[in-house]
Amino acid sequence: MKPKLLFATGNAGKLRELRALVGDAVEVVSLKDLPPVPEPVEDGATFEENAVKKAREYSEATGLPALADDSGLCVDALDGRPGVHSARYAPGSDKDRYEKLLADLADVPEERRTASFRCALALVTGRGDEARVEVGRCEGLILRAPKGTNGFGYDPVFQVEGEGGRSMAELAPEEKSRVSHRARAFLLMRRHLLAL
């Protein structure tokens, strides 16, 4: 019987990425496949702290090994903001958040608009187990205006380093899954998942 792993997400895209990565070695289930459990409060100061907290609490609540992620955008000219508050940087939609970001960077010259998407993945296999943590990064620049229609979040305003000046939202899904911060973290985590 294949080992079962809870991926603590309701995001169908993230779930597809993980299932493709581990293949048939592990049965991956999501929060939608299980009875409701309380959602952890993401109050950590870092992506790693939030990911570990979520993985630990979901593993304890379900009795399953749990994988959780926390990710966001870190802009150098804003001292790393929005960082762990990326999803709460401004009320409203993704567009509201990236428009606030563009306004906050309005006077910042191109050479200082460097940024990175970061993703921390944490795996907890049982009660009292030490969390395994892997971090992926994708470097780039914040554009002056959105470009592209793919992706979500800050993708339209993030120009991916090494991708010919294209924004993350201009990449095809298979291209994004090759270069994204989450894809890089997943690849690092793969060996731990296959050891289940």
Image (cartoon, rainbow, N blue to C red):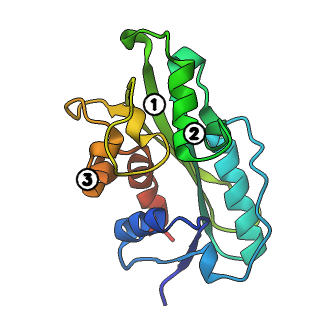
Q: Looking at this view, is 99 or 30 the one in front?
A: 99
Residue at (31, 49) in percent of width and height: 176
Which numbered disc, 3 or 1, marks the residue closer to the eye?
A: 3
Q: Position of residue 159 (x, y in %)?
A: 33, 31
Most extreme residue toward the bottom is 1
Disc 2 residue type?
Answer: Asp
Q: Looking at this view, is 141 or 53 the one in front?
A: 141
Q: Are marks 3 and 2 in contact (CB under 8 Å)?
A: no
Residue, disc 3: 172
Q: Compared to 134, does 166 lie above or below?
A: above
Residue at (66, 82) in percent of width and height: 34
Which numbered disc, 3 or 2, marks the residue closer to the eye?
A: 2
Q: Position of residue 24 (x, y in %)?
A: 37, 79
Please rate how many residues cluster around mark 1, counting C-alpha atoms within 10 Å: few if below 14, some from 14 to 19, many from 20.
many
Disc 3 residue type?
Answer: Ala
Task: Give me the C-alpha separation between circle 3 and circle 1.
Answer: 19 Å
Please rate how many residues cluster around mark 3, counting C-alpha atoms within 10 Å: few if below 14, some from 14 to 19, many from 20.
few
Please rate how many residues cluster around mark 2, counting C-alpha atoms within 10 Å: few if below 14, some from 14 to 19, many from 20.
some
Task: Give me the C-alpha separation between circle 3 and circle 2.
Answer: 24 Å
Secondary structure under the numbered disc 3 in the rendered image: loop
Residue, disc 2: 96
**The quarter of the displayed image where residue 22 is located:** bottom left
Disc 1 residue type?
Answer: Ser
In this view of the protein, can residue 129 be seen by the observer? no
**The quarter of the displayed image where residue 82 is located:** top right
Instruction: Using the image, tell me which numbered label, if any, was put on residue 116.
Output: 1
**The quarter of the displayed image where residue 147 is located:** top left
Between discs 3 and 1, the one toward the N terminus: 1
